Amino acid sequence: MQEILTTANPTLTGEHIAFLGRYGQTRKTEAGEILFRAGDTSYEFVVVLEGEVEIVDDFAGEARSLGLP
């Protein structure tokens, strides 16, 4: 049996978003765009302001969806 752990996503207030905006940039993404891969130590901190993000596990060459918010 496989176990998949989930966490609740925090809701950011306008104040939180403004604070984070001072240290980063806002950009649009495209459907299917990969934001980061497992083991990538150089990925950026990502805050999703709208839309959905699919979490995909690519284990042994087989991609499987672990969840959508």
Image: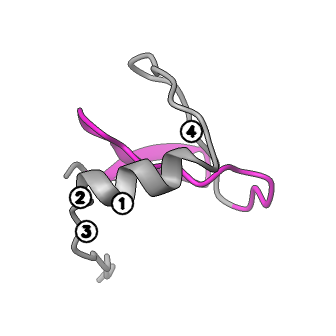
Q: Could you give the CA–CA distance between mark 4 and mark 3, rounded to whole angstroms?
A: 19 Å
Query: Which residues, given as a range, are shown in magenta?
Result: 39-67
Write down the residue under mark 1.
16
User: Looking at this view, is 21 or 4 the one in front?
Assistant: 21
| Disc nearer the start of the sequence (4/3) | 3
Residue type at tag 1: His
Disc 2, SS: loop
Q: Could you give the CA–CA distance between mark 4 and mark 2, rounded to whole angstroms?
A: 23 Å
Please rate how many residues cluster around mark 4, counting C-alpha atoms within 10 Å: few if below 14, some from 14 to 19, many from 20: few
* 4 and 2 marks in contact (CB < 8 Å): no
Instruction: Single out the mark in the foreground, 4 or 3.
Output: 3
Q: Could you give the CA–CA distance between mark 4 and mark 1, rounded to whole angstroms?
A: 21 Å
**Residue 21 vertical placement versus 9 (above, below):** above
Residue type at tag 4: Leu
Disc 3, SS: loop
* 3 and 2 marks in contact (CB < 8 Å): no
Q: Quadrant of the N terminus?
A: bottom left
**Residue 26 vertical placement versus 19 (above, below):** above
Residue type at tag 3: Pro
* 1 and 2 marks in contact (CB < 8 Å): yes
| Disc nearer the start of the sequence (3/1) | 3
Which mark, by number, is residue 35?
4
